[in-house]
Structure formats: C-alpha cells, structure tokens
Amino acid sequence: MGSCASVEQQGKYVEAVRIEDPARKQKVLEKRLKVAELVKKHLSPVGLLYPVVELEPWKHFSGDHIDPGEVLDSAFDDKSRLEINIAMSGGISKIGKREYCWMNATVLSAYVGNDVVSTSIFVEHKTKGGKVFEIVWLATHRSQEGKGVGGTLFEWILALAGHKQVSAVLVTANTNIVGWWLAQGKKRTKQCSLQATMLWKCQASSKLPRKDLDEATTAKMNNLLASAHLQDSPTAAVSYFYDSPSQRLTQCAAPFRYDISNTVHMWYIIKARRGSINDSKTPHATSPKKKLSSERRGSINDSKNPKPNENAVSSKKKKEAISDKNRRHSHKK
C-alpha cells in the first residue's frame, strides 16, 4: 500500500538532482537527528512495532533484513523510485521551472525486530497558516498489509506533529487509496480533524478504490467516498497553507510537491494537545479583579457581610454615660 503520484505530471519532465555536497548532507543529518530525539522522547512502541527516524536511509541494510527502500520500491513505479531516492538524500526535484527541496524530509519507519514493515517520507513546511507536514509517500510491506501497521505509522506522524507545534498534516494521496486515508481520519479523531472538503480535479466516476481489495473493503471504501465532498480550490480552513490561497491547484500547489491533477489533497488539522496554551480545557488562573474582589469580602465596606466596629460602639457608650452624669449633677444644683 502506498500514497504517491507519478513523477511525470501533465507531460512535464521531473528532474531529480542528487546532492553530493558534504556540508549540505551534514545539515540534513543534523535536522534528522533533532527529529529522532523527539521521536525517542515522545513516541511509544505499539505491540511489536517501534518507530525509528532513518538518518541515512540511502544506505542499504546488510544481510537479509528489510530496509525502507525495499518497502517503498515494492509500492511504487520506477519513475517514483528515482525521486524517492533523491528525497531520502535531501536533494532537489526540478518540475519545469520550479524546484522542490527535500532538505526538510523525514523518513520515519515502523520496525518489527530488525525489519522495516512500513515507512513514510514527509516534509516540513513553514507557511502563512503555520507549520505543515506533507506526507508524500507512505507504504507498508505487502506481507504486513491489513494488520494496522500503516495506520500506526500515521498515528505516530500525527503525534510528532503535535509535539512540533505543526498546524496541519497534508496527504497527497493516490486516487486508489483515498478511501483508506478517509478511514484513518475517522479513527484518529482525538488527534486531528479531517477536513470535510478535499481538493481534487476529478469526475465522480473517478472515485474508485484499489482493484486488488476484497469485496468487503471495497464496499466500505465506496461508502466513505460517497460522503466525501471534492472541489478544486482551497477552503477557508486550509487556504493559507498554500502560497497563493486563491489559486487553482491544477497546475501548481506550492509549496507542496504534487498538484491536484494526479493526487487528492487531504488535510488533517491537528488538535491542540491537552495542557497547551491553546487548549480550552486547561483551567485558567483567577483574574486579578476576581482575586481582589474575593479579598474584599468581609471588610467593613462589604454590604453583604457588615461587621460592627466594637471600639467605636464602646467609645460612644462612654460619652453618653458621662453626658448623662453631668446632666444629673447640674439638676441637683
């Protein structure tokens, strides 16, 4: 299973440029080391699955172990494999006059033992609407399909997005796997909300799930697709993640890799983590005014809780007694 578009779009030749500059490779490695630290600190294993950030994924494993490249190679065609290799090394893709940089690409894999069972390549972008993770490729080894491995990997990506203050995750999905991604959005409602409107230039008849799925899964995906609303321009909720919010995305979807002529743009808006400053459930401190008001309760000026001044009352009584004594003395004279 994989989500990807062909490298060749609308007759435009895509040139993938491998970067051999040692200084650049060092920067790529440093960025991935930082992500690896976050993964180690915040992401937990699920059963036998555990997450790993691939620091140098272009290096093939030794022995009989399955590596990330093998998992991706099994899911995508030769044209895509060329660009996948460039993405792993932090190179550049040239699409016509436009360049797409893979320096911020992270390769996150799910392992069982020493074997990669699912892997993904996603890129972090800084946009006007906030930071975005763009999942360009995600694939599960054929032997592990249907076991929830890809879903676990996606859940880790969402969790990592939350810890990195990422606003949204974009999936540029192949049309034959849209139903699977819709299902993931419904399963991960505590972490994210899937935008009801997806961006895609298509006809209703084009909404077909993969042909190699069983009948029950095909029916489930068709039901999900029937409820999906598709359009070819950004909604208000996601428009500011694009360089030109008002543009049609059939020719370019900058800053993201694929436009919507061959892929579906599926947006997952990340929900604020509990305890963060944006979390409405976080209890707020008492405001200064309320605190001051509570301190005033019970004071002599508080009409709700009047307290007599004992000293003042005692002094008044003494004066009245002295005055009364003087009057009696005067009367005797």
Image (cartoon, rainbow, N blue to C red):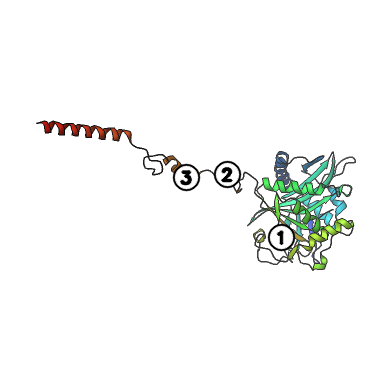
Q: Amino acid type of disc 2?
A: Pro
Which mark's residue is nearer the viewer, 3 or 1? 3
Q: Quadrant of the C terminus?
A: top left
Q: Nearer the viewer, residue 1 or 10?
A: 1
Asked if disc 2 and disc 3 are in contact, CB closer than 8 Å, the reply is: no
Q: What element carries label 3?
A: helix
* Residue name at image x 47 percent, y 42 percent: 291
Give the residue at mark 1: 196
Asked if disc 1 and disc 2 are in contact, CB closer than 8 Å, the reply is: no
Give the residue at mark 3: 290
Give the residue at mark 2: 283
Q: Amino acid type of disc 1?
A: Ala
Please say if 306 is above or below 171.
Answer: above
Q: Amino acid type of disc 3?
A: Lys
* Residue name at image x 37 percent, y 38 percent: 307
User: From mark 3 to mark 1, how far is it between C-alphas?
Assistant: 41 Å
Residue 242 point in image, percent of width and height:
67, 60
Q: What is the crowding at mark 1: few (fewer than 14 residues within 10 Å), some, or many (at least 20)?
A: some
User: From mark 1 to mark 2, how far is it between C-alphas?
Assistant: 30 Å
Residue 252 point in image, percent of width and height:
72, 64
